[in-house]
Image (cartoon, rainbow, N blue to C red):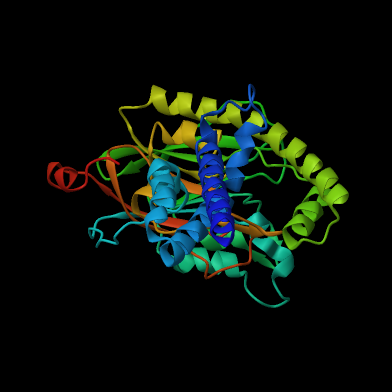
Amino acid sequence: MLKDLRKVIYYMLVGANIATIGLMALTGFSDRFSPDAHPLLSVIGLGFPVFLLINLTFLVFWVLFKFRTALVPMAGFIACLQPIRTYAPVNLNTRAPEDCLTVMSYNVYLFAGWATPKGEKNEIADYICRSGADIVCLQEGAYHEIQGEDVHQKLKSIYQYCDTADKDRSNSILAIFSKHPIIKRERIKYESLNNHSIAHWLKIGEDTVIVVNNHLETNGLTEEAKSGFKSIISGNLLNSSAKNHSKLLIEQLTEATRRRMRQADKVAEFIRAHKNEKIILCGDFNDNPISYAHRTIAKELNDCYIASGNGPGFSFHENFMYVRIDNIMCSSHWQPYNCFVDKSIGMSDHYPIVCKLALKTEENQEKHPTE
């Protein structure tokens, strides 16, 4: 009798593990679904890390209690290797060449001026000035005097070349600060109330490089939806209340995902139109790595974090929403090195993402083929 009970429990656990793998695969490959045709499926990528951790728990359990059955979760990891690498890559850090460009993308949240104590300098502006970056792409970079300090003027003391672009006089200002001349700019046209993408042509030595700065559609979550998400994660809601808040959250997420789909398509279209040119793309996608927007743009370029970063690299850190939504990507002309999310400064609701890029030569192209 006891033996039969153990067998039943064993098969139930194996079944639960297989179901977990199925859900891990569904969420991990959800970036293939069109937000128009499958709105709900297009946002479930947010749940991928949950099933990844559950499968990891099963692996530890089977190794301890039924070693041969550990092949089940291992098979799941192999089947989902691509989304696992997309979500949390593992790379060896290698020494970057001396002549690398250092690129930073940073949603500065209006430089968080309200958090700057009276009489003190703005931490975000100070951080950028001492970063050593050659090219800095900012989102939500609205500038004004913060405690009597013009943050843009301060940045101009380090960066000789700069340009800003707003969206219908909103606070959604895209700014680029560069140590290299800016030749021209072009707006990538798509529909959005407050978000936009700008391409700048930079002269870097003998090369002309296109730098695309993006701030794709925000999720536009209401305070009620944010509060609901926080309560759900904390386990503080009754089931009926959690269901209502979850429904509101999903409705707002799917609507924003549809808008980002069209914006990502336009950005990808621009990249394809300039596919033979040297391109660096930065920005706040407002979407996680397993999403239609990320996959659509990354199909045309090399995601520098996936190619040279390590771990999940959460760049957004507010309301229990820990996700990597800030990106640096590049065309095949570049070799990325040691991309990382810098958590040393927490003034904004985003952390900056930084990467070193080296132009490929025939020699290092053989060593580092395109990812």
Q: Position of residue 298 (x, y in %)?
A: 43, 36
- At 64% from the left and 40% from the top, the residue drawn is 166
> Where is the C terminus found, in terms of image quarters?
top left
The answer to which of 48 and 223 lies nearer the viewer is 48
Question: Would residue 89 be seen by someone viewing this image from the given angle?
Answer: no
Q: Position of residue 45 (x, y in %)?
A: 58, 42
Establish if 360 lies above or below 157: above
Give residue 80's quadrant in the image.
top left
Q: Position of residue 186 (x, y in %)?
A: 50, 30
- At 70% from the left and 39% from the top, the residue drawn is 253
In the visual, does 196 lie left or right of 242?
left
The answer to which of 48 and 89 lies nearer the viewer is 48
In the visual, does 302 lie left or right of 113?
left
In the visual, does 50 lie left or right of 280?
right
The answer to which of 56 and 291 lies nearer the viewer is 56
- At 15% from the left and 43% from the top, the residue drawn is 366
- At 73% from the left and 76% from the top, the residue drawn is 118
Give residue 159's quadrant in the image.
bottom left
Question: Would residue 129 be seen by someone viewing this image from the given angle?
Answer: yes
Which residue sits furthest bottom? 119
Which residue sits furthest front? 1
Q: How many marks?
A: 0
> Where is the N terminus found, in terms of image quarters?
bottom right
The answer to which of 266 and 55 lies nearer the viewer is 55
Q: Position of residue 223 (x, y in %)?
A: 82, 51
